[in-house]
Image: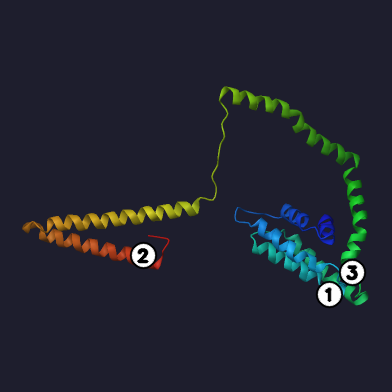
Amino acid sequence: MSLLLIAVAQNRADDVADLILGLSRTTLMSDEPGFLHDLRRKLPRYHGRPLSGIRAGEALADLQRIAFEYGISLPTSFALVGKTLAQADSIARVLYPNLDPIQLMEEDALEVMLRETERRLEPNQFFAWMYTQLEPLARMPRRVGQLVSKLETGTFKVGVSPTDLEGMEHVLRSVANRIGGAVIVAALLVASALLARVHDLRWFAFAGFCAAFVLGVYMVWKIIRAPGEL
């Protein structure tokens, strides 16, 4: 959150978007470029304005609305942060309405970054981070060698796992059902026309024409009622 506030204070929309996306849950339907474009357009409005012209709670609510609009699910902690900022905003507006919160954050940015750096360089955390980073690097040469060997022998395989194909499957099934229904109607019409030429089978031809008519009307009604289904 400190890094996010610093990025907001320094008008770095790209970093704000990266930090928010890192905290949020996204899907294949999330429009991340559109979210970044909106941030670049709206973030500068909070710069160079006193506290009396900025409402922090509304600003965070605006950020939540933008994220929701582009399919990005913010963590629930954002709602608590927004409530806290709204309360602090109302108090500061009475005590010091000319305060520039952006300037204040810029002044405290260095202190926040130094405090965060000191926390990360604490021996236990630093060596734990080094271990987690160096272990994969130590295994990398062996994995690269295995990859090169598979490329040389032609045994390298790539697996692709398709996702989000339910919509396409539904469309293909609907198209296949409609084509099948149209073929059945056409077959009934052709068979009934052939049977109509035989005197003893005219009742069968009439029944076939009726079945084709009923099935055809049902298909037309279903298409009009639900275009995506059969």
Seen at 76% across and 55% down, the residue is 14
- Which residue has dot 2 on it? 222
Give the left or right position of residue 79, taking residue 186 as reference.
right
Disc 1: CA contacts within 10 A as few (<14), some (14-19) or many (>=20): some
In front of the other: 131 or 178:
178
Seen at 27% across and 62% down, the residue is 215
First in sequence: mark 1 vs mark 2: 1
Q: What percent of the width, then of the height, locates residue 80?
A: 78, 64
Q: What percent of the width, then of the height, locates residue 10?
A: 84, 59
- The amino acid sitting under disc 2 is Lys
Label ID, residue 100 = 3
Q: What percent of the width, then of the height, locates residue 116?
A: 88, 50
- Which residue has dot 1 on it? 53
Residue 68 visible from this viewpoint: yes
Q: Measure the C-alpha gap from mark 2 to mark 3.
A: 62 Å
Q: Measure the C-alpha gap from mark 3 to mark 1.
A: 9 Å
Quadrant of the frame with the N terminus: bottom right
Disc 2: CA contacts within 10 A as few (<14), some (14-19) or many (>=20): some
- The amino acid sitting under disc 1 is Gly
Please tell me whether mark 3 sits on a helix, a strand or a loop. loop
In front of the other: 85 or 223:
223
Q: Measure the C-alpha gap from mark 1 to mark 2.
A: 57 Å
Please tell me whether mark 1 sits on a helix, a strand or a loop. helix
Residue 22 in the image: above or below residue 102: above
Residue 72 visible from this viewpoint: no
Q: Marks 3 and 1: CB-CB under 8 Å?
A: no
Q: Quadrant of residue 207?
A: bottom left
Instruction: Give the color scheme: rainbow, by chain, secondary structure or one colour.
Output: rainbow
Q: Marks 1 and 2: CB-CB under 8 Å?
A: no
Seen at 6% across and 58% down, the residue is 199
